[in-house]
Image (cartoon, rainbow, N blue to C red):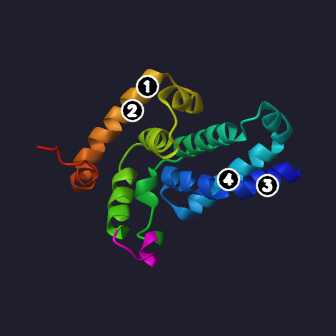
Amino acid sequence: MQDFEEWVQARSRSLARSAYLLTGDVHLAEDLVQDTLARVADHWSRVSRRGDPDAYARRVMHHRAIDTWRRRSVRPAEVMGDSHPELGQHGPDVERRLVLRQALLRLTPKQRAVLSLRFYDDLTEVQTAGVLGCSPNTVKSQTRQALERLRVLAPDLLSDLVEEPIR
């Protein structure tokens, strides 16, 4: 079980960031990480033998998040308070993070999951489809729709990320 504890130490922060991207709430993210780690621990011998506990943990986390969204009668963006953990941090990117957070909360849960897997966890379309249990074409369409929605919700944010063409 020591190898599980070492894996948890090495991956906890990354799992917490992914969970926060999925839930948009620090407390819900902590619950999601704990639930994910408990499920990974239950199957650790099989998961570690297969050699990719990160992939299994991502799959569990996203499935648990989707199960939570399905059980809720209200979307997460509607139940979250105005608490912003980023406000305690200082720097030029605070406002940008808040704009991004608000825009992400207005996407559907599946769109947030697709964006976090594709662009935060840097998974391919096929890997993302495997985690979410859908087809690669669904990942492509969800990504396209989510990015279109973000362009509407936060145009300044995306324009900051795109370089001006060289003339």
Q: Are marks 2 and 4 in contact (CB under 8 Å)?
A: no
Residue 5 appears anywhere in the view: yes
Q: Mark 3 touching mark 4, by CB under 8 A?
A: no
Q: Measure how far apart labels 2 and 1 are at the Cα level.
A: 6 Å
Name the residue type under label 3: Glu
The residues bearing labels 3 and 2 have C-alpha atoms spaced at a distance of 35 Å
Residue 142 drawn at (x, y percent) = 39, 32
The residue where tag 3 is placed is: 6
Which amino acid is tagged 1? Thr
State yes or no: discs 2 and 1 in contact (Cβ < 8 Å): yes
Q: Callout 2: 10 Å neighbours few (<14), some, many (20+)? A: some
Q: Depth check: 82 or 13 in front?
A: 13
- Mark 3: few/some/many CA within 10 Å (<14, 14-19, 20+): few
Tell me which label, 3 or 1, sits earlier in the chain: 3
Q: CA distance from mark 2 to mark 4?
A: 27 Å
The amino acid on which the numbered mark 2 sits, given as a three-letter code, is Gln
Q: Earlier in the sequence, mark 1 or mark 4?
A: 4
Q: Which residues are magenta?
A: 86-92
Q: Secondary structure at mark 4?
A: helix
The three-letter code of the residue at mark 4 reads Arg
Q: Which residue corresponds to mark 1?
A: 138
Compared to residue 161, the image places residue 85 above or below, namely below
Residue 83 visible in image: no
Choose top left, top right, bottom left or bottom right for residue 10. Answer: bottom right
- Residue at image x 46%, y 53%? 76
**Is 41 in front, or is 96?**
96
Q: Which mark is residue 142?
A: 2
